[in-house]
């Protein structure tokens, strides 16, 4: 269906165009300056000056499906995604059963397609059962739709196993996404180890827990020449290591979550378990360094690590609660804050949330607004002020530290393949 | 990894003297060894040990012995009165039997010595074991050892001749020689004018070796021998089983299809289930995945050329590296390899014990 969006600020690769965007047959037909273009569209939406960006590509979500539908399922996950402007998501393998075989991969991929809302690309497990002992069937999973491999939620503890996994993945020209955590060093830690954990009496997770594994994985990427994507970097030193690796031309990319760009360990007040996340919220100098690294390209991708947990599971003491924060619907306003504070431009926004993830995943049909690309589009009212609450929330779970917080900027419409898949009710 | 290039097939129409000047560096080494110093041992397939005239000699003799092996009475007295010890430090049935049959066909006294049952369990040094056997008057050892270099170390300490029957991940020269002989036999059958001993036929042949290359002594010995003979070698397998460093000129294929297409010889290697596959395996996820992406199966057999042959060094894991269809295929030369193995080993034993004029001096 021919659809026209008018009166919008369109973030194209080269410039921001005040104008209109015409979509048909699932693709972008043209992007035109000016507000009254001649186009025989069946549907016309007046965007009232809103900003249009490519549908966001979230490389890191947990949809808990199969097996933990009380937290989330692919249907509700997809609804939360489009409400956050996300039209392509990659879900991690720590489902139950684990996505370590083609049957589960295929189930996830097809169920994602069945929602009609987003493209859901499964990330296969690196090792069977995420146990870190034997290789999972990567080739067969790729045939079933897997786009990368990760034991996310757990590190691959054995360096030999990780080497073999990277070597094997290299044979298929695919990507290993690493969760970086020295399990022994983490011990029973529940929040960042620092003055604040001491004050609260919560067992700490030193930054080195993450950094040791980041550099190990970097060195294995150097050895194997496999593409390594380093998930949810949270520390300044971690980024320094990544900077070094990039200077050595080691084949790596990395991602940072919106919550690690906004919250510190000092945010954990009153033992609110919605602040319990892994990697943990770090210190303010880490947040500063992360923010500074957005613009210079050191950080490749922003991904949510959307990790739903049921209220009952989070409704316990801090030490016992599971790690995880939901993030699909807060990514856009949190990044717009960084635009307003001049840490990034809207072009950086698009690079971090769409074009670079598309490149990493090899999705050449999306990630930029230009003619011929897939018509995956998010319309953002960048100035809308509101409180993010459970009425807006589309996820089955509510474990976000931003629930009840004031936000600025919201996705008003999301289009997938040129079809309207989300509209903000107001 | 490089992609393969297209090759002009050359079934050896060029004269053997083409060897001399315009060959790759490795081959220059290969022919520069003076043929005067005859090797008292067959330890590996490098140029110091195996050179063209020796290969021709082995092939010629092996053809004779193969003829003998097809007779009702399969016996010659070439090794009568000689003592051959099969010294196996590692489990083996096929190779040991092949050596044993070879020695017996030539009328040697054969002793099978499985070392795990003897000195090794008494903590005797293997070199002392060798000295003890030497004192009993052994003429030839056929040795298999789980550790690279051990056979060579023994050879340095014994007054007898030594054939390496496989040492760790290092070498398996008799396998490489019998594979080369099987290839030579095939080309000769295609071109009646070409003699079994004409090794110029190897020049330009495309040989694809598929499977565990990194730790396979069969692959290692074959790559050395066949590339020295002028074959173009392509290797393929799971990246976990490919070597980090490849010899000069060896190409690495990206897919099984690109390894099969245009190959004159496809050599499938055995997946060592005990080491590489199954619970706790770090190199191969599963039999199904291995067969699908790295195996020779009904999906890809049609990619083989009309005159392509399939080799496998033995004890095939059915449905893992090769489907039943591939094993039983008319292109398969797996059982010819076994027969040729006996003949070739007879040729080597006969050569070591009857042709080497100089008495070997042990370098103690």
Image: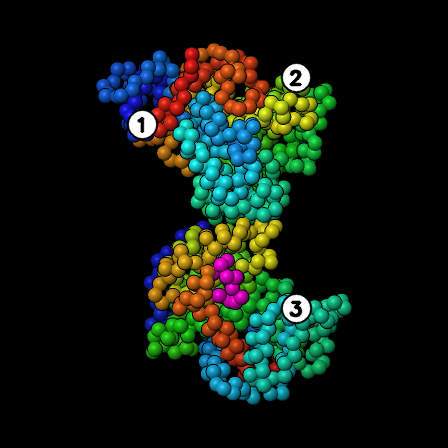
Quick check: do tags 2 and 1 share a chain? yes
Direction from residue A124 to residue A45 in the image, left or right? left
Specify how the rendered protein is coloured.
rainbow
The residue that label 1 is drawn on is A28
Quick check: do tags 2 and 3 share a chain? no
Alpha-carbon span between mark 2 and mark 3: 67 Å
Q: Quadrant of the C terminus of chain A?
A: top left
Residue B157 appears in which quarter of the rendering?
A: bottom right
Are discs 2 and 3 less than 8 Å apart at CB?
A: no
Q: Residue at x 53, y 80 (%)?
A: B346
The residue that label 2 is drawn on is A269
Direction from residue B154 to residue A402 in the image, left or right? left
Parent chain of label 2: A
Mark 2 element type: loop
Mark 1 element type: strand
Q: Residue at x 45, y 16 (%)?
A: A410
Q: Main secondary structure of the magenta part?
A: loop
Q: Position of residue B53 (x, y in %)?
A: 46, 77
Q: Residue at x 52, y 58 (%)?
A: B212
Q: Quadrant of the N terminus of chain A?
A: top left
Parent chain of label 1: A
| Crowd band around label 2 with a 10 angstrom C-alpha radius: few (<14), some (14–19), many (20+) | few
Q: Is residue B80 magenta?
A: no
Alpha-carbon span between mark 2 and mark 1: 47 Å
Q: Earlier in the sequence, mark 2 or mark 1?
A: 1
Circle on res. B89: 3
């Amino acid at each position: 269906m021919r659809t026209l969006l008018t009166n919008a600020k369109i973030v194209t690769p080269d410039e921001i165009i005040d104008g209109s965007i015409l979509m048909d047959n699932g693709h972008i037909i043209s992007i035109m300056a000016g507000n009254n273009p001649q186009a025989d569209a069946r549907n016309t939406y007046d965007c009232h000056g809103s900003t249009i960006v490519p549908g966001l590509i979230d490389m890191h979500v947990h949809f808990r499906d199969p097996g933990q539908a009380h937290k989330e399922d692919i249907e509700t996950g997809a609804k939360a995604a489009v409400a956050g402007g996300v039209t392509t998501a990659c879900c991690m393998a720590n489902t139950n059963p684990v996505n370590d075989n083609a049957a589960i991969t295929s189930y996830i991929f097809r169920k994602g397609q069945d929602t009609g809302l987003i493209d859901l690309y499964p990330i296969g497990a690196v090792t069977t059962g995420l146990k870190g002992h034997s290789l999972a069937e990567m080739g067969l999973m790729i045939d079933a739709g897997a786009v990368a491999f990760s034991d996310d939620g757990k590190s691959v503890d054995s360096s030999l196993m990780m080497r073999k996994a990277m070597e094997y993945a290299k044979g298929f020209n695919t990507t290993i996404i690493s969760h970086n955590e020295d399990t022994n060093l983490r011990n029973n830690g529940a929040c960042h180890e620092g003055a604040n954990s001491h004050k609260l009496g919560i067992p700490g997770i030193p930054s080195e827990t993450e950094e040791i594994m980041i550099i190990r994985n970097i060195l294995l990427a150097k050895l194997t020449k496999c593409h390594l994507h380093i998930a949810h970097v949270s520390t300044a030193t971690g980024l320094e290591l990544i900077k070094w690796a990039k200077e050595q031309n080691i084949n790596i990319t990395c991602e940072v979550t919106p919550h690690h760009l906004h919250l510190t360990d000092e945010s954990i007040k009153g033992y609110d378990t919605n602040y319990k996340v892994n990697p943990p919220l770090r210190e303010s100098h880490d947040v500063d360094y992360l923010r500074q690294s957005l613009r210079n390209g050191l950080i490749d991708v922003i991904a949510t690590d959307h990790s739903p947990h049921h209220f009952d599971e989070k409704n316990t003491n801090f030490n016992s609660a599971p790690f995880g924060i939901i993030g699909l619907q807060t990514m856009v306003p949190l990044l717009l804050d960084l635009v307003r504070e001049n840490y990034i431009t809207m072009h950086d926004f698009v690079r971090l949330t769409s074009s670079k993830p598309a490149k990493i995943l090899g999705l050449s049909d999306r990630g930029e607004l230009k003619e011929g690309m897939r018509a995956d589009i998010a319309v953002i009212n960048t100035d809308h002020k509101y409180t993010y609450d459970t009425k807006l929330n589309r996820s089955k779970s509510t474990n976000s530290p931003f629930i009840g917080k004031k936000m600025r900027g919201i996705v008003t419409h999301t289009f997938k393949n040129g079809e309207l898949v989300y509209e903000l009710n107001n | 990894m490089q992609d393969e290039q297209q090759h002009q097939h050359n079934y050896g129409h060029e004269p053997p003297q083409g060897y001399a000047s315009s060959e790759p560096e490795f081959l220059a080494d290969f022919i520069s060894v003076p043929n005067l110093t005859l090797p008292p041992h067959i330890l590996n397939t490098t140029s110091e040990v195996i050179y063209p005239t020796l290969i021709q000699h082995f092939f010629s003799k092996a053809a004779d012995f193969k003829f003998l092996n097809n007779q009702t009475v399969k016996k010659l007295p070439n090794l009568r009165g000689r003592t051959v010890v099969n010294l196996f430090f590692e489990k083996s049935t096929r190779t040991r039997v092949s050596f044993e049959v070879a020695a017996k066909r030539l009328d040697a006294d054969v002793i099978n010595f499985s070392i795990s049952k003897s000195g090794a369990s008494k903590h005797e040094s293997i070199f002392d074991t060798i000295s003890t056997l030497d004192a009993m008057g052994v003429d030839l050892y056929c040795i298999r050892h789980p550790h690279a270099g051990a056979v060579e170390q023994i050879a340095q300490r014994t007054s007898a001749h030594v054939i390496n029957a496989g040492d760790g991940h290092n070498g398996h020269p008799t396998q490489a020689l019998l594979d080369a002989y099987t290839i030579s036999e095939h080309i000769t059958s295609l071109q009646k004018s070409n003699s079994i001993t004409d090794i110029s036929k190897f020049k330009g042949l495309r040989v694809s070796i598929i499977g565990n290359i990194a730790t396979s002594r069969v692959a290692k010995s074959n790559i050395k021998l066949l590339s020295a003979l002028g074959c173009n070698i392509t290797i393929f397998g799971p990246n976990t089983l490919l070597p980090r460093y490849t010899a000069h000129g060896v190409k690495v294929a990206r897919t099984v299809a690109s390894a099969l297409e245009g190959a004159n010889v496809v050599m499938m290697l055995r997946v060592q289930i005990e080491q590489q596959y199954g619970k706790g395996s770090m190199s191969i996820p599963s039999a199904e995945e291995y067969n699908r992406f790295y195996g020779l199966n009904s999906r890809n057999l049609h990619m083989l050329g009309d005159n392509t042959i399939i080799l496998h060094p033995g004890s095939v894991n059915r449905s893992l590296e090769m489907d039943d269809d591939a094993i039983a295929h008319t292109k398969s030369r797996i059982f010819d390899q076994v027969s040729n193995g006996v003949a070739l080993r007879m040729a080597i034993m006969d050569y070591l014990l009857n042709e080497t004029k100089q008495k070997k001096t042990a370098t103690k």
